[in-house]
Amino acid sequence: MAGGGPRSAGRSSGGSGSNGRSRNELWSLLTEYFTPRRDCGVTLPSGPCGLIHVKNKRVQLIVDRREYLHSSICSDKDCETTTEAVFYKNPEKRVALLEGGRGQLLSGPPDPALVAKIQKSFIQLVNEFAATVKPGKVENTENQPVLYESCCAGHCDELIYLLEFGKIEELDRYPKEEYAKVMSCYHGGQAVGHHMSFFMFYIVNFFIGTKLLLYNNVENAPKLDSMYEYACDGQTFLPYQRKNLHLWMKDLDATTQMCKATFRCIYLYVYLRRKFEPEYKIETDGTLELGCGDSIWLRLFNYWQ
């Protein structure tokens, strides 16, 4: 990658925060989720203790044949068997992110507990930054030309412009009736649906996937979905930053700048919803969901080229 090896993109891109946990937890959890262990492990009955419950001859035979399992047996006779767990010989040894090259997707196996941790960490990160936005604060006063064809002349594209450039003063003056129009705006057909949900899906996907690749120093990056390159009945990327997509994961500075802009858009979106919707709860905002049930698939990043 031009400009040296990947490094933290800084506070504005969600790369740092008020403490080390918020700075790195999300990316380490995502790395854990998307990098499988080198051995497949063995699935055995378990309980709240997280250890092996030897309840029958089959389990006893499996344990007897694997010396590394002997230290993971539950000795509490009253411990209830409530689930199954996977036990590994070398749990710390993992395959590097996208080590397999072409034919891989940024997807992970069903893991409800880990997916829940990832989602919670992401929400905490966004929440931390959204809470720092102060009414009237001037974050970016520079006016930039809009380098794209408008897919929704008027309210939708105007608001996205303000989010992209962090124009907080103008967001604070943004009329409630215009906000209502944006949040009830639908484009195209069933594939697009609600405009802001459609837009935020692509923005969140881009931010999470790109920061994950940078965090893991991935040099041979996958290909971005072509939808990012143009507006299709609704915006799929930040309009002004779209001109830099050809530099994605090739130029560190340009990639970092895109991360900063997308993350700023995400937390200002939350700030704006709180401003106009007193009942808004970030924890139940479906547009910020990373997973689908108990798994995560960043389907806009892939090696199928």
Image (spheres, helix red, strand yellow):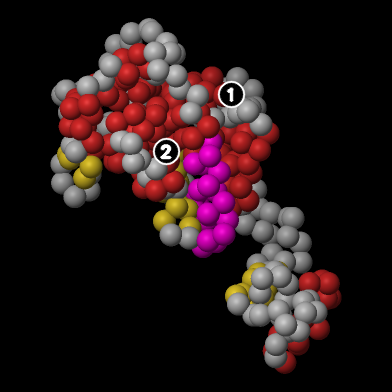
Q: Is residue 175 left or right of residue 214?
A: left
**Distance from Cα at disc 2 to Cα at disc 1:** 17 Å
Q: Residue 93 carries which label?
A: none
- Name the residue rendered at 54%, 19% in the picture: 253
Let me know if residue 117 is in the magenta part: yes
Q: What element carries label 2?
A: helix
Q: Is residue 14 left or right of residue 41?
A: left
Number of other residues with Cα within 10 Å of mark 1, as a class: few under 14, some 14 to 19, many 20 or more: some
In this picture, is 35 found above or below 192? Answer: below
Q: In which quarter of the image is residue 161?
A: top left
**Which is nearer the eye, 128 or 25?**
128
Chain part drawn in magenta? 101-125
In this picture, is 103 found above or below 194? Answer: below
Amino acid beneath label 1 = Gly
Q: Is mark 1 on a helix, strand or loop?
A: loop
Q: Is residue 283 left or right of residue 169?
A: right
Give x and y (percent) for residue 24: 64, 37
Give x and y (percent) for residue 207: 47, 35
Q: On the image, numbered disc 2 is attached to which residue? A: 204
**Which is nearer the eye, 130 or 277?**
277
Q: In which quarter of the image is residue 183?
A: top left
Q: On the image, numbered disc 1 is attached to which residue? A: 10
Amino acid beneath label 2 = Val
Rendered-image quadrant of the C terminus: top left
- Name the residue rendered at 60%, 41% in the picture: 27
Give x and y (percent) for residue 246: 42, 26
